[in-house]
Image (cartoon, coloured by chain):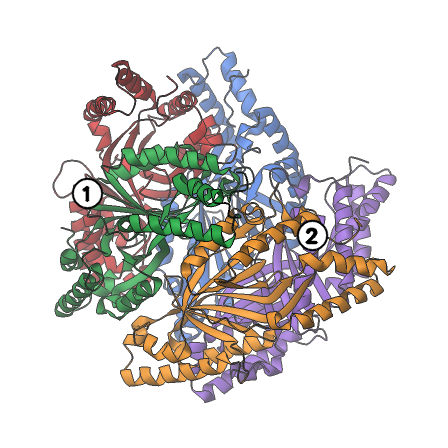
Chain colours: A purple, B blue, C orange, D red, E green
Amino acid sequence: MAQLPPVPLTLEGSGVLHQFFRFDWKGWWNTPMADRERIAGEAARLLGELERAHGGTQVRSALYSQLGHKGDLILVHFRDNFGGLNQVELDLARNPLYDFLIQVHSYVSIVELGLYESTRKTYEEASAKGHETFGPEWQAEVQATLERQARAMAPRLYPSVPDTKYFCFYPMDRKRGEQVNWYKVPFEDRQQMMHLHGLIGRRYGYQVKQIISGSIGLDDWEWGVDLFSDDPVAFKKLIYEMRFDEVSAVYAQFGQFYVGIRLPVEKLPAWLNGKLE
Amino acid sequence: MAQLPPVPLTLEGSGVLHQFFRFDWKGWWNTPMADRERIAGEAARLLGELERAHGGTQVRSALYSQLGHKGDLILVHFRDNFGGLNQVELDLARNPLYDFLIQVHSYVSIVELGLYESTRKTYEEASAKGHETFGPEWQAEVQATLERQARAMAPRLYPSVPDTKYFCFYPMDRKRGEQVNWYKVPFEDRQQMMHLHGLIGRRYGYQVKQIISGSIGLDDWEWGVDLFSDDPVAFKKLIYEMRFDEVSAVYAQFGQFYVGIRLPVEKLPAWLNGKLE
Amino acid sequence: MAQLPPVPLTLEGSGVLHQFFRFDWKGWWNTPMADRERIAGEAARLLGELERAHGGTQVRSALYSQLGHKGDLILVHFRDNFGGLNQVELDLARNPLYDFLIQVHSYVSIVELGLYESTRKTYEEASAKGHETFGPEWQAEVQATLERQARAMAPRLYPSVPDTKYFCFYPMDRKRGEQVNWYKVPFEDRQQMMHLHGLIGRRYGYQVKQIISGSIGLDDWEWGVDLFSDDPVAFKKLIYEMRFDEVSAVYAQFGQFYVGIRLPVEKLPAWLNGKLE
Amino acid sequence: MAQLPPVPLTLEGSGVLHQFFRFDWKGWWNTPMADRERIAGEAARLLGELERAHGGTQVRSALYSQLGHKGDLILVHFRDNFGGLNQVELDLARNPLYDFLIQVHSYVSIVELGLYESTRKTYEEASAKGHETFGPEWQAEVQATLERQARAMAPRLYPSVPDTKYFCFYPMDRKRGEQVNWYKVPFEDRQQMMHLHGLIGRRYGYQVKQIISGSIGLDDWEWGVDLFSDDPVAFKKLIYEMRFDEVSAVYAQFGQFYVGIRLPVEKLPAWLNGKLE
Amino acid sequence: MAQLPPVPLTLEGSGVLHQFFRFDWKGWWNTPMADRERIAGEAARLLGELERAHGGTQVRSALYSQLGHKGDLILVHFRDNFGGLNQVELDLARNPLYDFLIQVHSYVSIVELGLYESTRKTYEEASAKGHETFGPEWQAEVQATLERQARAMAPRLYPSVPDTKYFCFYPMDRKRGEQVNWYKVPFEDRQQMMHLHGLIGRRYGYQVKQIISGSIGLDDWEWGVDLFSDDPVAFKKLIYEMRFDEVSAVYAQFGQFYVGIRLPVEKLPAWLNGKLE
């Protein structure tokens, strides 16, 4: 079956937008208190609406107080399509709080479930029916399987933001070096490495929830990783342990890391008054 | 025929300018509504003129609402020459909307059709006539062939902007590493890799239109790639699949990726009023 | 015992925040002297509180006058958790001195003691009890050992800022190159290299105190190194000597280096008046 | 003759300064028209003087309208020494137009003629006289030869700016990689590669004029390359063809590329009024 | 003697601070002439004091007019300790000229004399007395030798700024690549390469004076190199020739290059009036 395609199948779900803002504390504290209170109220109102994506039952946007100079506030949004994400950007830009927000970074991606485990089976079943690889019937067959899986996976493809105290985001690539090149590794070897990699994640599953989104063609890294936990040491321990794992040790290239503390919308006015808790 | 030149022939068409702007929403919302309406009108008028390149029937400029912090508005312009592109820059700089635009990136290139398939045939025919390689008759012969092909390819060399909802742009290089060096690969191998690469693009052709422009000597990468589709997931799937293809897996180096949603000129005033749709 | 995990055990203590600020001297000297005196007083009051973490006996925050354009003032904070660090950021942002501070860099990490020497022993003891590696009893066993060690190491996990005249900070990674990859080196070899590395540090121990913090998953490098000494030449000599050591020569990748002179809180008003001493 | 030095002889001529400016269009269009006219006039007067280097017959400074966000105006200056270049900077800074210029890049170099073809002959002749290599007589002999050549080459060492419509500038290095290292290649091989490289340039000579300047020790790349042509496609074709040439394919490392359209001083007021032509 | 340490001994002298400033010409020319004259006078007075380090006979600070956009003014300071350098920063920040200075770069280092030639002899003599390597007597022995050498070398360790017209500064590292790693090269080979390297410098000694300072642990590169000459072409020729030398060709990694023209303090007012001479 050497002629099967080397690319693993993926399922795509929500569009994802990460926004990283510095907050203009100098301007803020020089604003009269009455104005600050009004602005805080209008911001909390908008963020409350965004959190529920204007009426749903899921938490689709979340706010974090960021540590360090890379920013002061992080917003993470899941929406059904890119138009929805772009409208969030426009809504924020119109809110009075925006006068004090300086956007310093962002990340655009789509929730992705990589199907390394089932891809070969899907390809082989399509081929077993006698269809020519990449021919229209073969593609239709593969597409039908993907759609079945997408329905089964819908809760993971269109997730709520996990309700944890700490948040970690980083983007990553698979290396395409001169000698070490993930995209030249045989499918079976990649599948095996991803399998072992998943075992580590599963061992930390009781402590750390993760959402993977794909950004090839959409932003500057290939994937974004969101981790959610009630203990920030768990981020450090999980990623350190993974770093010794073949697929990370050899093939992973990491971008910047961003860490925040969940800021429930109702605590935003207190935060704007200088109090985290 | 080992003495034939290693460089593939190319056809050049329109000059291309990509412009990426942040929009000064703070300044905008602090501008009186009547002024905003007037400015939106003047901007729409200019962009309408630019879209048709001051009178043609083709769509030669297009506007996109960009996702993420890398910018808010993207403008893509095709013009017959660099003077035309430079005049577009001056025209925009004079428009009242320019007070709210901060240009953060751009890309300068020329629409290019790479002729890997026909280059050898062209070289061999010129040589078959007994002309010395690179001699004046040989060059004239090659030049004549190129001009015939350019006439046949004119619609692709001087394209209209495809009418799709989503847009993706990225620049790229061919690697010149210590061991992996595209420019040292024999012509036949490059030709074969480009051929297989093209097959993937063709399979996605019903979903994704692409325009390649060359920028060697003009901007900081060797090529720019514009993709147009009504489904942004198609950008991700196409580029992911290509990444496993020899010519990309081993020889491609990618710059930043930019994604936008088409903003028809008539919808610009609504966008300036905070509404994508 | 080849099946033992390759990751060394670590103990985690205080959260650490480094802040690097440029000081707006132009704005400062254009501020009336009475205002400057009032602001200097309020800054000294807050920094005095931060130094003792609002009431403890340890020095948990320290201020340095930085050399060079990378900043003018450095603040280093140790706190029991990330919430405490984030609250420090908010407290500073509210202080009147903040009008003259431009934060240009920061570093987020957690005090870490790497247990290369004892890790194998801990793993083997847990395995010797017949528990399956990574099984729940095995993990509980390892966890219990870690907790015993953490109690014994508490003074180093929750340190006071050493009282020295000079300060040096830099972040670092272990290399994951195509041929040179720390994360692929067998545990025993890493342990041996870390042991020899430690010997150099110990030789300089009478002159240079160091605090290592881990930042995998928290910031852009894997570790942060704080050095404290009364002689800045000692920083240079120690790090130069280490650079010839296998683990640094081959496997270390360094970020930027930051150097400062301790500024006791009571000398801040003089500094703000242009006098270091 | 293995003991001959590996460094090729060079001749040095004019100091060269490239300046890249963004133009503050927002400030400009908000300036009253009478002021704009006066400032445009004073700018044209100064640039007219600079063009002739305050009285010569050669064109020693030239102005270009730049494409893309990397800048709006490029100035290229050739002067007899660095003091002359520095005085140009001071003269511009005093001109009223400078209020609207934001310098975003520059390049400092010296016109250089590399003598790969004649170096060995010069060395051998000096040695043939029995002088010890690098001894005072040997050096005097080499120096005398260089001075003869410099007199013969004076028009190329102290050039006028070629009178073409388009301009391209880029800096470059020769690679010093772990396996690919220009500075370890035997002199003869470098000489041969440079010879073949020159042949491509010569084939394009009717279309593209080039001026090479050296910047080792003066700026961040080793050389600067200025290309002048009436057809911008010639830049792309020439550099693409060269990229397959051994010396570029393997040993060249390129910086950013800058492209502009010649703006004769008398057309500057029109450009400042928003018209390229 | 394989057990001797691989690190070469070094002598340390003055602390060194390089400061690179852009000058706000726009603000300057918009300042009334009387104010400009007063400010120029106060600046010249302070720089005169700094030049002599408040009373010494040596020239310990020097001012240069920089070429290109990387800055307009360079200040180089030698002081006995870091406190002295930091006080210079505070003194400048208080001078009225500082309102027009934008610090864009700096470099912090310590004058260093590398003792590759004598290190082995020093180590062997200490060992010959029967002391254990790195034992307290061995260290005392080495230390005593270093102190003798430091006394003999005092004029070079605490230098005056050479009185030349042109100035060049650049930082550099020794490479620690995957195959090419200076810190893994045997001592004898490093010593030999440094010896040959020194011969080139000596040949240029009549034209170019150099001061090496070390910055491991202090700034972002390992060394800083200051070159002083009355002919800027000498910088280019010296560094080009060195680049073919083994230790540079293979093991050197260079940062940015900065070039300036000496501005005697008494000419600063003329410079501030737009005249270099």
Q: Which residue is label 1 attached to? A: D51
Mark 2: amino acid: Phe
Tell me if mark 1 has few (under 14), some (14-19) or many (20+) residues whose alpha carbon lies within 10 angstroms of its own.
many
Q: Secondary structure at mark 2?
A: loop
Residue, disc 2: A244
Three-letter amino acid code of the residue under disc 1: Glu
Q: Chain letter of disc 1?
A: D
Q: Is residue B86 left or right of residue C61?
A: left
Foreground residue among E26 and B192: E26
The answer to whether residue D69 of the structure is visible from this angle is: no
* Residue B22 screen position, x and y as percent: 46, 62
Where residue B183 sits in the image (x, y, percent)?
53, 30
> Residue sitting at 40 percent across and 62 percent down?
C70
Residue in the picture at 45% in, 29% down: D184
**Residue E276, relative to residue D230: is it above or below?**
below
Asked whether residue E131 is in view, the answer is yes
Where the C terminus of chain C falls, by quadrant?
A: bottom left
Quarter of the view holding residue B99: bottom left
Residue D64 location in percent, x, y? 29, 45
Residues tagged by mark 1 and mark 2 found on one chain of the structure = no
Q: Chain of mark 2?
A: A
Corner quadrant of residue A234: bottom right
Tag 1–tag 2 contact (CB < 8 Å): no
**Disc 1 to disc 2, how far (Cα)?**
62 Å
Mark 2 Cα-neighbour bin, 10 Å: few <14, some 14–19, many ≥20 = some
Q: For the residue labelled by badge 1, is the local secondary structure a helix, a strand or a loop?
A: helix
x, y percentage for residue D141? 22, 21
Q: Residue at x 50, y 74 (%)?
A: A94
